[in-house]
Image (tube, rainbow, N blue to C red):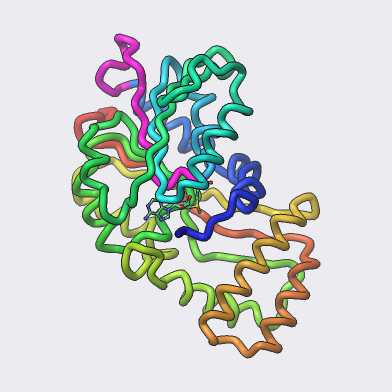
Amino acid sequence: MSGFSTEWLALREPVDHRSRSLALQSRLLDALARRPGAQQGRALRVLDLGCGAGSNLRALAPVLTGEQHWTLVDHDPALLLAARETMVRWASAVVDDGQPLVIDKDGRRIAITFLQCDLARELDSLLASKPDLVTAAALFDLVSADWIGRFCERVESIFYTVLTYSGSEHWSPAHAADADVLRAFHAHQLTDKGFGVAAGPGATQLMHDRFTALGFVVEQAPSPWILGPEDKSLMQALCSGSARAVAETGMVPEAELSSWLSAHRQALRCEIGHWDLLAVPPGLRAD
Ligand SMILES: C[S@@+](CC[C@H](N)C(=O)[O-])C[C@H]1O[C@@H](n2cnc3c(N)ncnc32)[C@H](O)[C@@H]1O
């Protein structure tokens, strides 16, 4: 199973939402306005990969116009259940409590199908539904370079992914072990997360190159977490999680890692780099 707890996802959700690049989001809206059926008011079909508890929908659906049909995909049934429950609480009103769940959110009608599926094995059948938009948040550093290659070749729609880890981290105050810990964390990033050797911080460049070679118009923008004293719980959970990952590598002596962790549990500020990326297929280019 994924190991992503609902508590961790809930903690990061508000920070994820404020960190997303608004400039790139507005480029996405421009591209969606050119999709087939947009002028006729056809409902927008969105596929959200690795949806977790549904944070990506809650960030994006409020800025999309017209009726929306979302398919939320994850392999973890507990997260899919949490996604459904959270969506019911988030809705202005529940229109139909079935499958799909149909909600009203501030006058927008959103139908949501929750689908348990392993992306490592069932990608083709998912993409066969030919959604208007394929999206994901905080997923692509987990997948492998091979999987990214296959994914890019199969996607025919607009693709928009946010908050892919970039590999850059700055903690304040700094600690003497920062560079060693980051090196070990990057080594852990490359371990198999269910898709083969993970792409980790190299994922965005791989997507960029692959989609560009396929004729897509590709843009990317930074979406760093900039955390301060008001984000203390997230910073503490973050450095504890990083220390656990680093300990698994055995690359940093225990005493050094423990000193790093206790220092950063009191950190005043930290910046974690991410990238957002938009890829628009050749048929929907603006020119
Ligand atoms: C970092 S979490 C991000 C969750 C959510 N997108 C968000 O932004 O809060 C990564 C998600 O990918 C899911 N995931 C990982 N491997 C998967 C797989 N093989 N198939 C489907 N989902 C997977 C995890 O269960 C988890 O929900």
Quarter of the figure with residue 195:
bottom left
Q: Is residue 28 toward the left or the right of residue 22 in the image?
A: left
159 or 105, which lies in front? Answer: 105
Q: Position of residue 279 (x, y in %)?
A: 32, 41
x 55%, y 18%: residue: 94
Residue 258, compared with residue 65, is above or below; it is: below
Q: Quadrant of residue 120?
A: bottom left
Quadrant of image for the C terminus: top left
Magenta stretch?
34-52
Q: Residue at x 51, y 46 (%)?
A: 79
Residue at (48, 16) in percent of width and height: 109
**Most common SS among magenta residues:** loop
Q: Say which residue appears at 46% left-offset and 77% top-offset.
A: 187
Q: Is residue 55 visible to us here?
A: no
Q: Is residue 142 magenta?
A: no
Q: Position of residue 172 (x, y in %)?
A: 74, 67
Image position of 209 with respect to 124: above or below: below
- Queried whether the magenta region covers residue 46, the answer comes back as yes
